[in-house]
Image (cartoon, grey):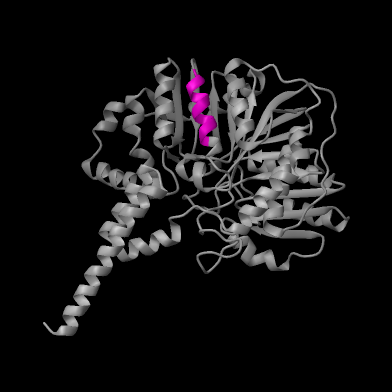
Amino acid sequence: MSDGSTLFLVLHNLFFFSVRLGALCVLPQRHPPAVAMTWLLIVLFWPLPGGLLYLALGSTKLPKLRRERHERALRRLRDVVGHGRSCPDPPLSEGASVVSRLGTKLAQWPVSRAETLELIDGETTLIDRLVEDIDGARESVHLLYYIFERDAVTAPLLEALERAAARGVACRLLLDDLGSKKYLRREGATLNGPLRLARALPLSRFRRGRLSARFDLRNHRKLAVIDGSVGFMGSHNITEATYGGKAQGRRWEDLTLRLTGPIVGQLQGVFLEDWYVETDEIIAAALPEERGCGGSFLQTVPSGPAYSTENYQRLVALALFQARERVVITTPYLIPDEGLLQALEVACLNGAAVDLIVPRRGDQFFVGRAAEAYFGRLMEIGVAIHLFGPDIVHAKTMTVDGQMAFFGSSNFDIRSFALNFELNMVLYGREVTGLIVEAQEGYLARSRRLDPGAWRERPLWKKTVEGVAKLLSPLL
């Protein structure tokens, strides 16, 4: 062996040893054990590609400018947070009071009221209601969506936006730069004038821009606010129900709430914050007027990497600790962390019947296998798993003892809890929770319960694929 070859071999081995040693020293200090272990396995086996992948995806820290704008926005929204607080505190149960106090501390939004509340389950109905409200708009229309498309179903919404802008209504459209990339690439450049468009979490060719974080940190929120008096939030994206035939023509089953009353001020606040972070523009927007102290009690829970903790995961876990009778969860993607698994186990040990509704066949192969890797443990602790099909249940809901409901854009997975900007609500009281329970019962009627014995007998190759997916699940 020549001297040059020997030197190359020494430097090669020294480099890869340094990468492995650095990973061993750094990763356990920066991440929870499960995430750190997954990254360590990747870097130890594939030092160069693993190290590069970690540099691209390993940190959830947002750029400094984005963090500063988020903090400034929260300070400026104090008036919005306090809006609608002239009424006395709502008469919540003990368990609900515990959850609401934590929600206020984490997300800074107190319990508020909805004067009217409508649950919408079909995308055509959603578009019709949005068009109706936008056609009646006088001041502003604010839309924030992860996926936004022009198709046969959504075209009337775009036409309504154009009509509103033409008559002088301030129309602002904030779209996730990755989720809505097709629409933005095709039509984004043509939008101007009174119809304002901004990109949420803009993609950058480089690791970081002034506002760009890692490319898979996304704004997954879905909301609309018209004139500051009518609000929509839930799991619907703005697209037809098959997402362009993405899953062999199967339909996505979603839910959205249409709200009026002081609670809409909180939705307006979430939009104003996101708009300011992306555009550096402060908007003096309308807020709903107070009209008595009746109605339903709700609490807005925004979450994402701009917050110091995983707001929604903490609230969900706390609510599960309070459960005594029944818990029903619907989610299209299930990758629970250890905290959520323990909370589900506590709910079962406390005597609650826990029903989990997931798609029989999802749209993402690897994520689906990662979810299945948890089925065995979930059934062992007492969770009944129901497989919904043939369509895809995309509604993200949880009800607890028929008197508290969690509802919004967040899946029950690590990505939604820690990486995405999400928007959810907690609904308090049996009457309003009953709307979500009724929808969940409809999903249950279209589901098949998974038999634990049959599940244990699945082929070895399936268990192996699930095991590999589970190892990587902290990164999914």
Identity of the residue drawn at 42% across and 61% down:
55
Residue 59 image offset from top left, x and y in percent? 46, 54
Stretch in magenta: 313-323
Q: Is residue 45 left or right of residue 268?
A: left
Q: How many marks?
A: 0
Residue farthest to the left? Answer: 1
Rendering quarter of residue 2: bottom left
Q: Main secondary structure of the magenta part?
A: helix
**For this rendering, which residue is in front, 141 or 440?**
141
Residue 140 seen in this snapshot: yes
Queried whether the magenta region covers residue 314, the answer comes back as yes
Q: Is residue 240 left or right of residue 89?
A: left
Identity of the residue drawn at 45% across and 42% down:
414
**For this rendering, which residue is in front, 264 or 366?**
264
Residue 207 vertical placement versus 251 (above, below): below
Residue 112 image offset from top left, x and y in percent? 72, 29
Residue 154 seen in this snapshot: no
Queried whether the magenta region covers residue 406, the answer comes back as no
Q: Is residue 60 left or right of residue 17?
A: right
Rendering quarter of residue 456: top left
Q: Looking at the figure, which quarter contains the N terminus?
A: bottom left
Residue 244 vertical placement versus 400 (above, below): below
Residue 300 image offset from top left, x and y in percent? 66, 35
Rendering quarter of residue 355: top left
Residue 17 image offset from top left, x and y in percent? 25, 63
Q: Is residue 83 left or right of residue 221?
A: right
